[in-house]
Image (cartoon, grey):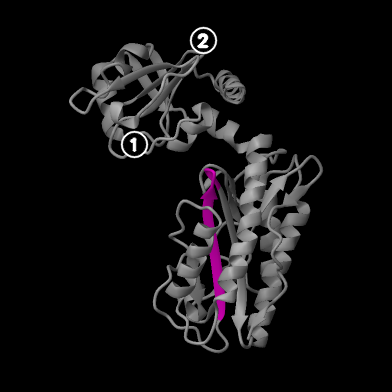
Amino acid sequence: MALFTTRIERVLANMERQGLHQILVTSTASVYYLTGVWVQPMERMFAFYLDDTGRCVLFGNELFGLQPMDGVELFQHRDSDDPLRDLVHVVRPGNLGIDKAWPSRFLIQLMEQRGDITPVLGSAPVDDARMRKDATEIELLRRASRINDTVVAAGIAALHEGVTETEVASAVEEAFRKAGAERGEGQLVCFGANAADPHHGPNQTVITDGDCAVLDIFIPFDRYWCDMTRTVFFRSVTEEERRIYETVKEANLTAESVIRPGLPMSEFDAAARRVIEKAGYGPYFTHRLGHGLGLDCHEPPDNSASCHVIAEPGMVFSVEPGIYLPGKTGVRIEDLVLVTETGCEVLNHYTKELQIVK
């Protein structure tokens, strides 16, 4: 419980800085971060209330199997009850910070029943705390990335004549399951021209000589995510694709070399983008440099040109520059990095040297 007490104290300090006296946390990952309770509520109501006196209250359906916890009041309801029955009597008048993840149907009901509260966006106190990983989280993220290094190798080993994107994705999913993941679906595998779409989902496309193969693979282990991308070439590579690959690799390495505490996230995006623009491919780097990662695969901070969050030790985010030529090819190289006191630690160690799979 000491771990969760420390995290709640960090959130309370953030609330004070941001002028919030009470918040309602409803994201599954954020409630877990503060309590150790993981619930996927689906359409049912699930919420954690925190106010500036340190009062902690958990609300949920009896079907969730919630258990009493030290320092946390517990209110449970049934499907036949008004899910807000207890919450309306707990919240105080005035501003109430609302989690961005809370469905509007519950918020509207609360506003109808409690006209003396004013809802304001209240995700920042928890989001800001979650951005700075503690030692427990860092070790879980390192472990997940070590596993991902082995799984991407298994995916690349599955490339052979006649194989489809779906079959390689299945090989990746099976490798994840063997490594202990609870699930493995949703992997991105793209051959040839399909790789020009950064989020192309695998289909029955068969790999052919000269195709690139982009494997963007991600999964949680013990709730914490790994995420990496490697691009290889099947049997041969053109000079243009070699040039594109080396440009993307240089952009990846350049961005990682400048990451350190005290700089805004936008500086890292700019460092990678300058490399790609200098090579003449600026218009074909069509997305941000990366995203934060932890209990969610995509979470703050945003690693983009528009993000001015200052990097701090303990932040973990992706560095994934790419070049995408419509109808032709695509290359992306992605690592996860941990900001340290003096720079960054790259969590992925699978080679970034150009590979031609025979």
- Asked which secondary structure carries label 2, the reply is loop
State the extent of the magenta-drawn residues as a range. 212-224
Label ID, residue 41 = 1
In the image, residue 308 sits, relative to residue 104, either above or below, namely: below
| Predominant secondary structure, magenta span | strand
Q: Quadrant of residue 354?
A: bottom right
Tell me the quadrant of the picture where the N terminus can be found.
top right
In the image, residue 93 sits, relative to residue 128, either above or below, namely: above
Q: Quadrant of residue 105?
A: top left
Label ID, residue 217 = none
Q: Position of residue 208 (x, y in %)?
A: 51, 87
Q: Residue at x 69, y 60 (%)?
A: 272
Q: Earlier in the sequence, mark 2 or mark 1?
A: 1
The one nearer the camera, 208 or 319, is: 208
Residue 342 in sight: yes
Residue type at numbered disc 2: Thr
Q: Position of residue 334 (x, y in %)?
A: 63, 61
- Asked which secondary structure carries label 1, the reply is loop
Q: Residue at x 66, y 82 (%)?
A: 356
How many numbered discs sit on the rendered protein? 2
Q: Please give left or right for residue 43 compared with residue 50 in the image.
A: left
> Is residue 171 part of the magenta span, yes or no?
no
Label ID, residue 53 = 2
Looking at the rendered image, the disc whose residue lies closer to the viewer, 2 or 1, is 1
Quick one: label 2, few (<14), some, or many (20+) residues within 10 Å? few
The one nearer the camera, 312 or 66, is: 66
